[in-house]
Image: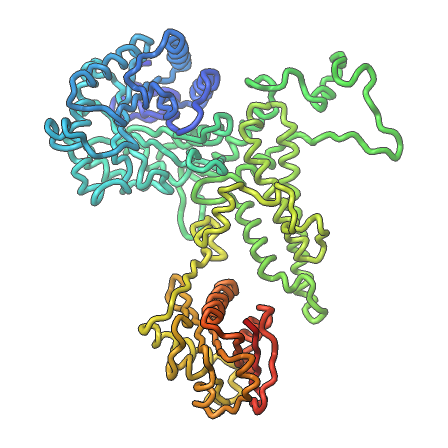
């Protein structure tokens, strides 16, 4: 493959063609030689021109970089490099010596040259040195030789580059390979400035954008890093990488990279999903993006909110193009791993062929009248693949259908009171049932998609997808059963929770257990409504909390029904405790905090007699004998989850019990429906009779 000139409609960067293609740079099982050869065919067909060989789990690429390849390994690499050349794909061999190399040791440099010389003998002529994901502290020997870590890397890279005869394609991956890693900023990074100034100009530099997995890459950010590096970078794009989460797969389009970037870049390589076959969409849509130019193609404008999108590239159109082509692969038995014979459905279409005798014996079963019809899954459709892509879209966003399902489930959950409401809310009930039916239809579409995918002739693609689609089908099934339960239609077997569930009812194993226990779980989910799970902290009350407790007390007092002015309402025994006029007993005061601040409190007195005397409330000795202690609990309305208040009162009652008290009571105003409901639902507090209690005050008590 020669340097200058276009290939496959690719734009130019100076006299060299724009690097475009795939980097196999993820952690996990590397792709097979057959899959890589298949990749080269796809790249050639779609107009991409580069493959960067950098699988993290090839031991001789990273961990044992000094070791030469064996004869058998050499044979495989020779065949692979040859296959890339046959399909006009530049094979770039990458090596990652940064884990343990001593830069100042000439023997180490010689070992690196020897390894790359071996690969050069295999027919490879393009190389890459990667120094990503390594410790930045130099060993003592290197500190004596080099002024900085960047200086050490640049010196060895320049030496290797010149040793290899200044190859046309030679990539360098810096340790600070994204803006988030730069200290203090990209423009002020001494590391990047050293690289930019000292790295030989023929060496290209890899860059992932603002972050490791960049949501968006702007023209301004590329201009900034280019000025520091003194060259246009090659983007190593992790937007479709999934090696950091075994439950996620990304089947959405290449997006949020404006085509105005193309003339400002040396190239773009996608580092996609670990699973080979599902990368059809990632690579296909990247190829469509690479072909977009400022003067060519249809200049459609997509609107997303108030933002005008790229006039040269539509992610949604690129996605439909990719899915349309992918559908043909799903239905093909010619792909590696396809069925060795057509499915029964496909066989029926070729009527002029002799029937296969190996299916079901000589006579196929035909059901009689009134019997069950034979099960035949419908063929996979483009709509199925659109749904699949929506469910497994991109790291920073769900597809449209997935967002709708989350919004509908949230609405159905928050309005569940309307599901079985009385006749005066007939219209709300009708709306709830209608939306529940629509949600059920969406769930059914996921199940049917799963069935049709499972029946697709190309098994290789199915096997790469199977764990993911099985997981989403089960998750959707749980949500579906939950909505039926809310609507009063759930049978016991449909209940998502019961005392003795089957193992598929408690999902995620140990990881799932941890996630459900941690209060911060879900605090950065893509579905931002409802907002993040609140993180509540219960701690001991201190003197500084007095003012904020008084403020909460006054706020909740004035939030009552207000039919009687506050000053005219009879006082509660606990009012003087909340108002700070009486101090709580030692170890009997707690406050509740969320991310905003103090949002509730629980105060107690192990001996309530002095507080009763203070407001001249006559309480019989028999009451104080059974319930000598007093508690008061209050939380602000923003605390919608009752469990933090329950935990707080539980801790307070435990402290009071430890003091030797045998019982505790509380007083509440009848118009404080919220706290009355709270104590009632606790189950342990029961109404108690108190002589002389004002008519609008309720007393409740519990034995300890």
Q: Residue 319: x, y in percent?
A: 49, 35
Q: Number of labelled discs?
A: 0
Q: Is residue 463 above or below residue 599?
A: above
Residue 495: percent from the left, percent from the top?
67, 51
- 340 left or right of 632? right
Residue 499 as seen in the image, left or right of residue 258:
right
Residue 50 appears in view? no
Quadrant including the N terminus: top left
For the residue pair 630 and 1, the one nearer the viewer reads as 630
User: Which residue sits at x=48%, y=47%?
Assistant: 515
Q: Please provide percent x and percent y for residue 9.
A: 38, 23
For the rendered model, the colour scheme is rainbow
Please name the residue shown 45% across and 72% down the image: 659
Residue under the point 64% across and 15% down:
340
* Vertical relation: 584 (above or below) 351: below
Measured from the top left, where is residue 123 in percent x and y?
33, 9
Give the side of residue 353 with respect to residue 124, left or right.
right
Q: Quadrant of the C terminus?
A: bottom right
Name, please, the residue furthest toward the front. Answer: 660
Instruction: Judge whether 644 appears above or below 621 on screen.
Output: above
In this rendered view, identify the residue nearer to me: 138 or 314. Answer: 138
Residue 76 is at least partly visible in this image: yes
């Amino acid at each position: 493959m020669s340097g200058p000139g276009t290939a496959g409609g690719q734009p130019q960067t100076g006299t060299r063609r724009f690097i475009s293609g795939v980097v196999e740079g993820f952690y996990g099982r590397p792709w097979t030689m057959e899959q890589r050869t298949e990749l080269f065919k796809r790249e050639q067909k779609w107009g991409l021109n580069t493959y960067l060989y950098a699988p993290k789990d090839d031991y001789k690429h990273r961990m044992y970089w000094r070791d030469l390849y064996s004869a058998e390994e050499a044979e495989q690499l020779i065949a692979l490099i040859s296959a890339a050349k046959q399909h006009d794909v530049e094979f770039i061999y990458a090596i990652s010596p940064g884990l343990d190399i001593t830069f100042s040791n000439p023997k180490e440099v010689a070992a690196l040259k020897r390894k790359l010389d071996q690969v050069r003998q295999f027919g490879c002529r393009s190389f890459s040195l990667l120094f990503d994901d390594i410790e930045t502290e130099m060993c003592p020997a290197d500190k004596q030789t080099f002024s900085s870590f960047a200086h050490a890397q640049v010196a060895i890279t320049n030496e290797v580059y010149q040793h290899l005869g200044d190859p046309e394609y030679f990539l360098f991956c810096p340790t600070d390979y994204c803006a988030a890693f730069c200290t203090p900023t990209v423009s002020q990074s001494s590391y990047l400035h050293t690289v930019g100034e000292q790295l030989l100009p023929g060496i290209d530099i890899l860059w992932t954008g603002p972050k490791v997995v960049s949501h968006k890459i702007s023209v301004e950010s590329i201009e900034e890093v280019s000025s520091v590096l003194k060259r246009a970078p090659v983007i190593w794009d992790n937007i479709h990488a999934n090696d950091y989460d075994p439950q996620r797969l990304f089947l959405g389009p290449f997006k949020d990279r404006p085509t105005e970037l193309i003339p400002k870049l040396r190239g773009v390589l996608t580092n996609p999903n670990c699973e080979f076959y599902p990368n059809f969409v990632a690579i296909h849509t990247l190829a469509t993006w690479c072909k977009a130019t400022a003067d060519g193609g249809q200049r459609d404008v997509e609107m997303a909110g108030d933002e005008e999108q790229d006039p040269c590239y539509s992610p949604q159109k690129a996605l439909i193009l990719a899915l349309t082509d992918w559908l043909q692969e799903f239905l093909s038995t010619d792909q590696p791993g396809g069925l060795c014979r057509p499915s029964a459905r496909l066989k029926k279409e070729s009527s002029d062929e002799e029937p296969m005798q190996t299916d079901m014996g000589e006579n196929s079963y035909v059901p009689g009248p009134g019997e069950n019809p034979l099960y035949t899954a419908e063929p996979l459709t483009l709509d199925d693949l659109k749904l699949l892509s929506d469910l497994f879209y991109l790291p920073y966003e769900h597809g449209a259908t997935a967002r709708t399902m989350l919004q509908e489930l949230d609405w159905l959950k928050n309005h569940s009171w309307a599901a079985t409401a009385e006749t005066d809310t007939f219209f709300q009930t009708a709306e709830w049932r209608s939306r529940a039916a629509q949600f059920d239809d969406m769930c059914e579409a996921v199940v049917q998609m799963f069935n049709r995918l499972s029946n697709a002739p190309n098994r290789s693609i199915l096997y790469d997808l199977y764990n993911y689609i099985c997981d989403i089908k089960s998750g959707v099934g749980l949500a579906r059963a939950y909505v039926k339960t809310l609507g009063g239609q759930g049978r016991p077997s449909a209940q998502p929770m019961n005392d003795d569930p089957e193992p598929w009812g408690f999902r995620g194993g140990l990881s799932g257990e941890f996630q459900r226990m941690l209060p911060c779980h879900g605090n950065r989910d893509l579905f931002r409504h409802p907002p993040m799970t609140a993180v509540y902290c219960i701690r001991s009350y201190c003197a500084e909390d007095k003012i904020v407790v008084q403020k909460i007390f006054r706020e909740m007092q004035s939030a009552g029904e207000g039919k009687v002015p506050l000053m005219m309402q009879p006082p509660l025994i606990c009012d003087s405790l909340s108002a700070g006029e009486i101090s709580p007993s030692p170890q009997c005061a707690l406050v509740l905090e969320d991310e905003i601040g103090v949002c509730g409190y629980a105060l107690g007195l192990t001996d309530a007699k002095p507080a009763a005397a203070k407001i001249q409330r006559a309480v019989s000795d028999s009451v104080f004998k059974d319930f000598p202690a007093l508690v008061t609990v209050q939380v602000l309305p923003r605390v919608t989850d009752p469990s933090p208040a329950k935990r707080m009162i539980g801790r307070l009652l435990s402290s009071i019990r430890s003091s030797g008290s045998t019982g505790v009571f509380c007083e509440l105003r009848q118009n404080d429906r919220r706290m009355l409901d709270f104590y009632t639902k606790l189950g342990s507090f029961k109404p108690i009779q108190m002589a002389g209690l004002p008519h609008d005050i309720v007393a409740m008590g519990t034995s300890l």
